[in-house]
Image: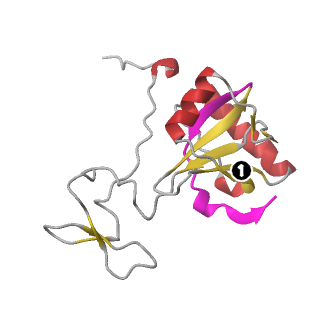
């Protein structure tokens, strides 16, 4: 039997956010409470209008507005090895890129107010070459962080982006 492959142009990307079920701030058995607020003594009770699977709009982890971060290669050697690995991931026609986190440093950060899904859809239709005047370069990683989950995209040049697996917690906290 031959394996049926889906062309990359037909692949649908899902940008889900985690719910409250695995959150460390959730307490209670029958009645659910959220105790993640820093300046509040008593936890807040979930109401019947709150979503059952998704995190509510008042979640203390949620960033309002969301934040966009751009990570850039640290130096010349990191640029060389990083571009080479991105080239081979394109050659293998993988759905996601997995850039090496230790090659990157934070270059730009700004409040954004748009979800990762809306950002990706806008890049597919319009194309984005700069973000708030910050010019993007090949191999830059753009991260849209809602506070609950961060979604990353690699800038492939010519106004195209590809979803990436990128753990920004491992990037050094120094700005370029």
Tell me what residue is drawn at x 54 percent, y 28 percent: 121
Can I make out residue 1 in this image?
yes
Q: Nearer the viewer, residue 37 or 11?
A: 37
Q: Does 126 appear in magenta? A: no
Q: Residue beneath label 1, please?
A: 71
Residue at the extreme left: 30
Q: Does 162 appear in magenta? A: yes
Tell me the colour scheme of the image: secondary structure
Residue 152 horizontal side relative to residue 75, left or right:
left
Residue 11 placement (x, y as % from top left) = 45, 24
Tell me what residue is drawn at x 43 percent, y 20 percent: 6
Magenta region, residue range = 158-176
Q: Nearer the viewer, residue 15 or 31?
A: 31
Q: Secondary structure at mark 1?
A: strand
**Quadrant of residue 90 in the image?**
top right
Residue 96 placement (x, y as % from top left) = 54, 36
């Amino acid at each position: 039997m031959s394996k049926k492959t889906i062309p990359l142009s037909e692949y649908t990307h899902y940008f889900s956010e985690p719910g409250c079920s695995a959150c460390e701030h959730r307490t209670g058995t029958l009645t659910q409470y959220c105790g993640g607020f820093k300046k509040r003594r008593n936890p807040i009770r979930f109401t019947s209008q709150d979503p059952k699977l998704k995190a509510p709009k008042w979640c203390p982890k949620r960033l309002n507005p969301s934040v966009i971060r751009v990570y850039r290669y640290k130096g010349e050697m990191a640029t060389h090895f990083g571009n080479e690995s991105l080239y081979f991931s394109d050659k293998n026609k993988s759905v996601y890129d997995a850039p090496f986190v230790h090659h990157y440093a934070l270059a730009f950060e700004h409040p954004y107010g748009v979800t990762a899904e809306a950002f990706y859809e806008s890049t597919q239709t319009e194309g984005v070459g700069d973000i708030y005047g910050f010019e993007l370069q090949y191999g830059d990683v753009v991260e849209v962080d809602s506070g609950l989950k961060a979604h990353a995209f690699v800038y492939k040049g010519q106004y195209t982006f590809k979803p990436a697996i990128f753990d920004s917690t491992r990037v050094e906290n120094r700005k370029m």
